[in-house]
């Protein structure tokens, strides 16, 4: 062997070793997810159809009849008849990622172009991905690099296009909301991991939007999507939401941590004020007779009254010989209670818990009549044409149960590098 050839071999061998190591790490990450009980589907954007359109497909349990191939669409064209068709070319590929590949959701400048990837309703209705009804729990996990935005990452969350607002002017297809479950990049708390569920597919508490949602305590960082490779490779974060039917809790998790989040003075919040009013209306309804401030027409199925049987903490605000004012903290509410001579004379909501959020319903169960939505990645169909989340998505997983804190930490740790891959 000549000296020059020896030098070439010596140069290439570390590169080959590095590639093999990276491939082993990627395979280990995928294996960790696919072996976790309850997995319904996991898109790593590496799995594709073997021929034809070569669409992205999901890892599914052995024996599953559906691999949930993803189509591309532009919802503005579908519902307003404006803009161009979307194709896979509208989702640039990173060429690497935690699981071997990643797609980019771009900050589109054309207001008539809002592309997303999706599984049509016709291909998911009544399959394991169609998690719905009473007694069902769900987990959605997305590994992403957030560049900007606070909207949808993945889920079955067709928000509807029937709202009477300026954005729906000229709408060609006005459709009622078809929400079930989804994970967002924050919404009212931008950058948090925000879980959303709906019992009716439509709105909550007489607001036009669905408001059963949670927000992780942690906030994701913003990283330009065109950053250098070494910056992007270190920027992956794990967003997750769980709904546990056994505890009636909807929880957001960022990098394996849920955290406690409360909203003080919810009556002053533009959206959560509707939940605060739903708490008030439910409380007043339980009192005999029509109470001051009570709306007798408020729908009973929209009351919001988390358990308040026993406080977990009590703070005395003021106490005199004949009056006592205290703030009682319950599992999901903080209430200012005034008593005189030992009798309660006032009760006021002072805070609502946003993480976890109390949700005592089942998940919306669409009939097989066109009232169910698709599973979408990157965006959801809705009346607004906002750009939404932008950045990179490297993996999307759905489970038909609420994963534990330990399991979510294990999935989050996959972003830490090869050393985080569990050893058997």
Image: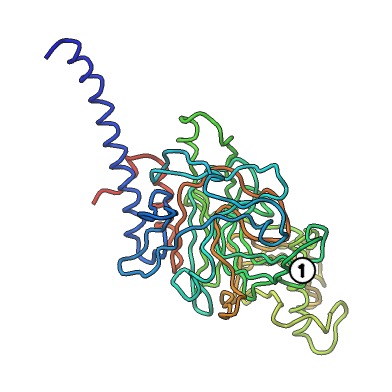
The spot of residue 58 in percent (x, y) is 41, 58
Compared to 318, does 3 lie above or below? above
- How did the renderer colour the structure? rainbow
Q: Which residue is at 57% across, 42% downward?
A: 391
User: Is 29 positioned to the left or the right of 73 in the image?
Assistant: left
Secondary structure under tag 1 reads: loop
Q: Which residue is at 58% across, 60% downward?
A: 195
User: Is 285 positioned to the left or the right of 14 in the image?
Assistant: right
For the N terminus, the quadrant is top left
Q: Residue furthest right?
A: 292
Q: Which residue is at 49% across, 75% downward?
A: 136
Compared to 327, does 231 lie above or below? above
Is residue 381 at least partly visible in the picture? yes
Q: Residue furthest front?
A: 52
Front in this rendered view, residue 263 or 235: 235
The spot of residue 26 in percent (x, y) is 34, 44
Compared to 268, does 335 lie above or below? below
Front in this rendered view, residue 89 or 325: 89
**How many neighbours does mark 1 have within 10 angstroms: few (below 14), some (14-19), or many (20 or more)?**
some
Is residue 216 at least partly visible in the picture? no
Q: Name the quadrant containing residue 355.
A: bottom right
> Which residue position holds label 1?
207
Front in this rendered view, residue 59 or 241: 59
The spot of residue 259 in percent (x, y) is 55, 54
The spot of residue 264 in percent (x, y) is 73, 57
Q: Residue furthest left?
A: 1
User: Is 232 positioned to the left or the right of 287 in the image?
Assistant: left
């Amino acid at each position: 062997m000549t000296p020059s050839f020896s030098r070439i071999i010596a140069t290439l061998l570390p590169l080959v070793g590095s590639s093999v190591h990276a491939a082993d790490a990627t395979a280990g990450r995928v294996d960790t997810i696919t072996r976790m009980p309850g997995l319904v589907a996991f898109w790593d954007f590496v799995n594709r159809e073997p021929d034809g359109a070569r669409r992205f497909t999901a890892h599914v349990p052995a024996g599953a009849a559906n691999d949930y191939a993803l189509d591309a669409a532009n919802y503005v064209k579908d519902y307003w008849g404006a803009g161009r068709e979307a194709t896979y070319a509208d989702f640039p590929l990173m060429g690497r990622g935690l699981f071997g590949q990643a797609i980019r959701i771009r900050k589109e400048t054309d207001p008539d172009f809002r592309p997303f990837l999706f599984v049509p309703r016709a291909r998911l209705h009544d399959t394991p991905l169609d998690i719905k009804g009473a007694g069902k729990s769900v987990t959605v996990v997305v590994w992403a690099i957030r560049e900007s935005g606070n909207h949808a990452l993945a889920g079955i969350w067709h928000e509807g296009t029937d709202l009477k607002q300026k954005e729906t002017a000229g709408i060609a297809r006005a459709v009622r909301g078809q929400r079930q479950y989804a994970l967002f990049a924050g919404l009212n708390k931008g950058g948090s991991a925000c879980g959303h569920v709906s019992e009716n597919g439509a709105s909550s508490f007489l607001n036009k939007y669905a408001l059963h949602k949670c927000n992780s305590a942690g906030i994701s960082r913003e990283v330009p999507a065109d950053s250098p490779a070494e910056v992007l490779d270190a920027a992956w974060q794990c967003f997750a939401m769980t709904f546990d039917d056994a505890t009636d809790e909807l929880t957001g998790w960022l990098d394996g941590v849920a955290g406690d989040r409360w909203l003080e003075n919810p009556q002053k919040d533009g959206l959560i004020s509707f939940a605060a009013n739903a708490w008030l209306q439910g409380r007043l309804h339980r009192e005999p007779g029509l109470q001051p401030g009570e709306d007798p027409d408020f729908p009973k199925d929209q009351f919001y009254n988390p358990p308040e049987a026993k406080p977990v903490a009590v703070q005395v605000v003021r106490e005199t010989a004949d009056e006592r004012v205290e703030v009682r903290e319950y599992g999901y509410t903080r209430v200012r209670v005034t008593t005189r001579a030992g009798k309660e004379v006032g009760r006021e909501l002072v805070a609502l818990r946003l993480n976890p959020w109390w949700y005592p319903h089942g998940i919306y169960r669409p009939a097989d009549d066109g009232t169910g939505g698709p599973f979408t990645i990157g965006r959801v169909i809705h009346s607004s044409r906002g750009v939404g989340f932008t950045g990179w998505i490297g993996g999307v997983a759905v489970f038909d149960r609420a994963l534990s804190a330990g399991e979510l930490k294990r999935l989050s740790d996959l972003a830490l590098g090869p050393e985080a891959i569990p050893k058997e």
